[in-house]
Image: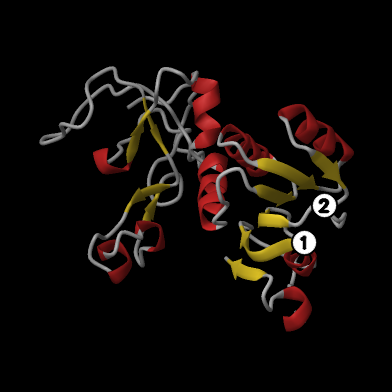
Amino acid sequence: MRPPDSSPGGSGCRRWIRPPVIGLGAGSSRFRLGERVGAAWLARTCGACKFCQRGSENLCLTPTFNGWDIDGGYAELMTVHQDYAYPIPDVFTDEQAAPLLCAGIIGYRALRCSGLPPGGRLGIYGFGGSAHLTAQMALFEGARVYVMTRSSAAQSLALRLGAEFARSAEAEPPALLDAAILFAPAGGLVPVALRALDRGGTLAVADIHSSDIPALDYQKDLGPNGDLRP
């Protein structure tokens, strides 16, 4: 398939793409020529390790990645295994769909790991590219969203998107949270977020990298309050 706006002269590391199918390999039957599909970071997995066998392919021991191990979205052409391509619904434009295949996937997984109940209160710490997509997903599903971020511009964006509350990164939300997601690469916010949880709540940490997490006080930070998930 041919990525749009491809840069000449080789493969780049861009991972999220949404081109049309321009050719099909032998035995490929999932898509049709001309169909709009997307490719994300994960290009292929072994299918044999214990993680693949139990359906956790994102934890595969020997994965292959688009834009790292094989040609990515800046290549003129790239080959994608049909099992790791995603049909793009017509409701999305190309520009809307592309970020969902990278930042959106990170946020979607974190949202599901948080265990947010229907109509629950979600705290989001940090409000960058993945977080603002996650907030929109949660709002679409009927959640009440509270955003804690140091950026005044990000606070304004959060309120425009529908968040009920947007203050500084260490601010105390106006109500206890049913779930929280940490996007900011600041380990010092882990105890802050944990203390904002209601009983049984979960903090999902969605950072790719982070500063060190300080020592936690079990009674104040965990205890009956909630769970911490990477």
Q: In this rendering, does residue 46 appear at all?
A: yes
Disc 1 on helix, strand or loop? loop
- Image coords of residue 146 (percent x, y): 75, 45
Report the quarter where the C terminus lies: bottom right
Of residues 143 and 103, which is closer to you in this image?
Answer: 143
Q: Amino acid at mark 2?
A: Pro
In the picture of the structure, the residue carrying the numbered disc 2 is: 173
Task: Tell me the residue at 36%/67% (across/down).
Answer: 61
Residue toward you, 72 or 134: 134
The x, y position of residue 225, in whole percent, is: 69, 70
Q: In this view of the protein, which residue sits in the foreground, 183 or 202?
A: 202
Q: Earlier in the sequence, mark 1 or mark 2?
A: 2
Q: Which residue is mark 1?
A: 196
Q: Is residue 214 visible?
A: no
Q: Residue furthest left?
A: 27
Q: Position of 83 compared to 202: left or right?
A: left
- Amino acid residing under circle 1: Ala
Q: Is residue 198 above or below residue 167?
A: below
The part of the image, by quadrant, that contains residue 66 is top left
User: Which residue is at 78% across, 37% downward?
Assistant: 164
Q: Residue at x 34, y 64 (%)?
A: 62
CB of mark 1 within 8 Å of CB of mark 2? yes
Percent across and percent down for residue 187 are 75, 67
Alpha-carbon neighbours of circle 1 within 10 Å: few (<14), some, or many (≥20)?
A: many
Residue 13 in percent (x, y) is at 51, 42
Q: Residue at x 77, y 61 (%)?
A: 196
Label disc, if present, on residue 66 of the rendered structure: none
Q: Which quadrant is home to the N terminus?
A: top left
